[in-house]
């Protein structure tokens, strides 16, 4: 496969699995919100992050960036960089949610979308997720699953 097609394939798969990772994140987040209460949104976000990171590591490793080695040293290097990068983006997401929900009071309003009420808190979560997905792609592509050699 030529380099241009490979990059397009990688981007399409990242968007696909990024969307599925976001779905995992949202399902766990809103389930925790239901169980713990809306005021526990930062705790719910961390729980969602744990499940999403586990899902994202496996899908990014195997299908998006095609890192096939399961040697202990390779997995440890990838996983430690992956979790570190995700912890950084989690910190940004937590700060963004706090800013949008507690300081800017996004949770005090809602909009109707296709007949469904969408809370400002959900809009805040979606906004931060978009930013996180973009940032995580950059980290994964440039730092974690970087290809070695001339076609890197």
Image (cartoon, helix red, strand yellow):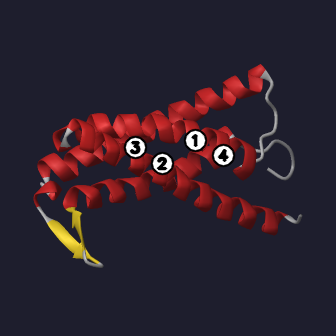
Dot 2: element:
helix
Residue 128 place in picture, x, y as percent? 35, 54
Asked whether the residues under the numbered discs 4 and 1 touch, taking CB atoms below 8 Å apart as contact, a structural biologist would say: yes
Asked whether the residues under the numbered discs 3 and 2 touch, taking CB atoms below 8 Å apart as contact, a structural biologist would say: yes
Residue at the disc numbered 4: 59
Location of residue 91 by image quarter: top left
Mark 2 or mark 4, which is nearer the start of the sequence? Answer: 2
Q: CA distance from mark 2 to mark 1?
A: 8 Å
Asked whether the residues under the numbered discs 2 and 1 touch, taking CB atoms below 8 Å apart as contact, a structural biologist would say: yes
| Outermost top residue | 72
Location of residue 115 by image quarter: bottom left
Dot 1: element:
helix
Q: In the displayed structure, does residue 12 sit left or right of residue 138?
A: right
Q: In the displayed structure, does residue 17 sit left or right of residue 131?
A: right
Q: Which residue shows up at 74% across the image and 44% down it?
A: 62
Mark 1 or mark 3, which is nearer the start of the sequence? Answer: 3
Q: Which residue shows up at 66% across the image and 62% down it?
A: 11
Residue at the disc numbered 1: 55
Q: CA distance from mark 3 to mark 2?
A: 6 Å
| Quadrant containing the N terminus in the rendered view | bottom right
Q: CA distance from mark 4 to mark 2?
A: 13 Å
Residue 93 place in picture, x, y as percent? 35, 45
| Outermost bottom residue | 114
């Amino acid at each position: 496969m030529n380099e241009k097609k490979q990059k397009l394939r990688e981007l399409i798969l990242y968007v696909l699995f990024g969307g599925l990772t976001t779905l995992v994140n949202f399902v766990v987040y809103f389930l925790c919100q239901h169980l713990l209460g809306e005021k526990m949104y930062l705790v719910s976000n961390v729980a969602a992050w744990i499940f999403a990171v586990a899902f994202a590591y496996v899908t990014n490793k195997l299908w998006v960036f095609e890192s096939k080695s399961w040697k202990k040293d390779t997995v440890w290097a990838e996983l430690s960089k992956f979790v570190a990068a995700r912890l950084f983006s989690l910190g940004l997401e937590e700060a963004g949610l706090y800013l949008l929900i507690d300081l800017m009071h996004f949770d005090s309003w809602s909009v109707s979308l296709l007949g469904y009420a969408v809370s400002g808190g959900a809009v805040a979560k979606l906004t931060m997720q978009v930013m996180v997905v973009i940032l995580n792609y950059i980290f994964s592509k440039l730092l974690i699953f970087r290809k070695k050699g001339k076609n890197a």
